[in-house]
C-alpha cells in the first residue's frame, strides 16, 4: 500500500502544485477587503520655491496631459530658477500609476543610462539616471515622500510600504530634470 501511495504522489505532485498556486492566487479575492488608505481631506498649494529658488508653473506637455487625465492624483510641472524643471505628482492612495520616471522617459523614446542613488546638497537620497535622445542629454532624479517625511527612491518599495500600511499618505513624488551639456 505504501508503494502505491508513493507512486501516485510522485505522479500527481505537478497537479497539486498547480492547484496550490491557483488557490493562492485566488485567496485575496475571498478575503475581506481591507480599508483603503484614507484620502487627504484637502490638497495644499503647490510649493512656490525649491531649494531656495523660486518655481514658475509650466503647462503640462501633451503627453503629461494624457497621463494626468487617467492619474489618480494631481500633477504639476515647474521651471526652477537657475535652470532645470521639477515635476510633482501627488496621490492619496497606493497606485501603480505612480511609476518610476525611467519608465516614462523610456516610453517616450529616451535611452536610459547611468542609474544610481545619489545624495543632494541637503543629504537627501535620490534615484538618478541620464536620459539621451537625438543628441539631447538630461539628468533625471526622483524620490517619493510620505506624510511623515519618510522617503523612497524605489517606486516598488513605496508601493508595497503604502499598500501594507507601513507608509501613510498623501505621497508626493518629486522628479528633477536638468539639462546636461
Image: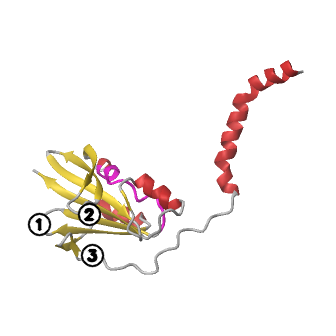
Find the distance from the CA under tag 1 to the CA under tag 2.
Answer: 21 Å
Residue at 24% across, 60% down: 176
- Label 2: element kind: loop
SS of the residue at dot 1? loop
The residue that label 2 is drawn on is: 61
Label 3 to label 2: alpha-carbon separation: 20 Å
Which residue in the protein does label 3 denote?
A: 47
- Mark positioned earlier in the residue sequence (1 or 3): 3
Q: Give the mark, 3 or 2, whose residue is nearer the N terminus.
A: 3
Instruction: Quarter of the image for the N terminus: give it.
Output: top right
Q: Nearer the viewer, residue 181 or 158?
A: 158
Range drawn in magenta: 93-105
Residue for badge 1:
82
- In percent of width and height, residue 96 lies at 45, 57
For mark 3, does the 10 Å Cα neighbourhood hold few (<14), some (14 to 19), or many (20 or more) residues? few
Instruction: Tell me, yes or no, whether the highlighted magenta stretch contains residue 117.
Output: no
Residue shown at the point (22%, 69%) measured from the top left: 78
Amino acid at each position: 500500500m505504501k508503494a502505491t501511495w508513493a507512486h501516485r504522489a510522485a505522479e500527481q505532485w505537478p497537479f497539486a502544485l498547480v492547484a496550490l498556486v491557483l488557490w493562492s492566487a485566488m485567496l485575496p479575492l475571498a478575503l475581506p477587503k481591507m480599508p483603503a488608505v484614507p484620502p487627504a481631506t484637502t490638497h495644499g498649494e503647490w510649493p512656490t520655491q525649491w531649494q531656495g529658488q523660486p518655481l514658475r508653473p509650466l503647462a503640462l506637455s501633451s503627453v503629461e496631459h494624457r497621463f494626468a487625465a487617467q492619474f489618480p492624483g494631481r500633477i504639476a510641472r515647474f521651471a526652477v530658477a537657475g535652470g532645470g524643471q521639477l515635476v510633482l505628482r501627488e496621490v492619496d492612495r497606493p497606485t501603480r500609476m505612480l511609476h518610476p520616471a525611467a519608465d516614462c522617459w523610456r516610453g517616450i523614446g529616451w535611452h536610459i543610462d547611468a542609474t544610481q542613488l545619489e545624495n543632494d546638497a541637503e543629504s537627501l537620497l535620490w534615484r538618478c539616471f541620464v536620459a539621451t535622445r537625438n543628441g539631447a542629454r538630461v539628468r533625471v532624479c526622483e524620490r517619493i515622500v510620505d506624510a511623515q517625511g519618510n522617503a523612497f527612491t524605489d517606486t516598488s518599495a513605496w508601493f508595497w510600504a503604502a499598500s501594507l500600511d507601513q507608509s501613510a499618505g498623501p505621497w508626493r513624488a518629486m522628479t528633477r530634470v536638468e539639462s546636461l551639456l
